[in-house]
Amino acid sequence: MSEVTDDLPAPLAEVIDDFDALSEPDRLQLLLELSDELPDLPERYADVEMEQVHECQSPLFLAVELEDAADAAGEGPGAAEPVVRLFFRAPPEAPTTRGFAGILHTGLDGQPVSAVLGVPDDIPFRIGLSQAVSPLRMRGMVAMLARIKRQIRDKSAGSLGSPAPPYVRFRACPSLRRPPSGSVPRSP
């Protein structure tokens, strides 16, 4: 590992070190290879709505599961920290987006919750693709990581018996509209 990657989960550090060792054209080739290696979704996600990452230039959907660490190792239930399982859906004709998902899947799937939450938000810029890929595409990978972390926090909060923090989508609601100035609001 290098100084740039010593604070990362080992699989993610290895991916970044692999990119770092390559020239720019070869980095793009590795990104395409990771795109091809992105696993298919399990059957249980065939009809499940997944969270869309709107910042991505191509349609990308993701889901996060937390799995008991002992179950992941085949040892039965235990008290160890849960591990993160990542699932992505992106069309084959979107290799850059799939490649970014492949980086995150390879580097973070199966890692403990605390390790994934500890990944710096700027990690997409440490991969060495900033010169070869547009800023809008880089923004998509940053957003993927942010969504993964938010889903982990939501699921972790729910699994500890406390409710997950609310994420509210605001809509126009007649009862919540501000009355015109000078008017007196009606009581319900």
Image (cartoon, grey):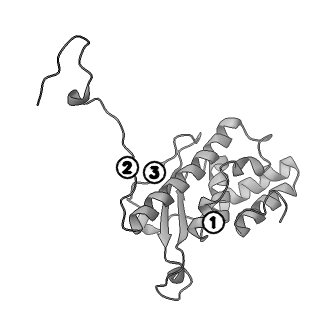
Secondary structure under the numbered disc 2 in the rendered image: loop
Q: Residues within 10 Å of mark 3 (few under 14, many from 20)?
A: some
Q: Is residue 151 left or right of residue 179?
A: right
Residue depicted at 38% across the width and 59% down the height: 47
Residue at mark 2? 166
Judging depth in this view, the residue of 46 and 24 nearest the camera is 24
Judging depth in this view, the residue of 180 and 150 nearest the camera is 180
Task: State which quarter of the image contains the N terminus.
Answer: bottom right
Residue 89 is at least partly visible in this image: no
Residue at mark 1? 115
Q: Residues within 10 Å of mark 2 (few under 14, many from 20)?
A: few
Q: What is the distance, in whole Å, between disc 2 and disc 3 at their CAs? A: 16 Å
Q: Is residue 145 left or right of residue 123?
A: left
Query: Given this view, does label 2 or label 3 mark the residue nearer the observer?
Result: 2
Residue at mark 3? 51
175, above or below 74, in the image = above
Q: Position of residue 3 (x, y in %)?
A: 84, 59
Mark drawn on residue 38: none
Name, please, the residue furthest toward the bottom. 75
Residue depicted at 84% across the width and 52% down the height: 26
Q: Position of residue 72 (x, y in %)?
A: 54, 80
* Pointer 2 or 3: first along the chain: 3
Q: Position of residue 132 (x, y in %)?
A: 79, 41
Residue depicted at 36% across the width and 67% down the height: 161
Secondary structure under the numbered disc 3 in the rendered image: strand
Q: Amino acid at mark 1?
A: Ala
Q: Amino acid at mark 3?
A: Glu
Judging depth in this view, the residue of 101 and 160 nearest the camera is 160
Q: Position of residue 148 (x, y in %)?
A: 54, 55
Residue 49 is at least partly visible in this image: yes
Q: What is the distance, in whole Å, between disc 3 and disc 1 at their CAs? A: 22 Å
Q: Amino acid at mark 2?
A: Pro
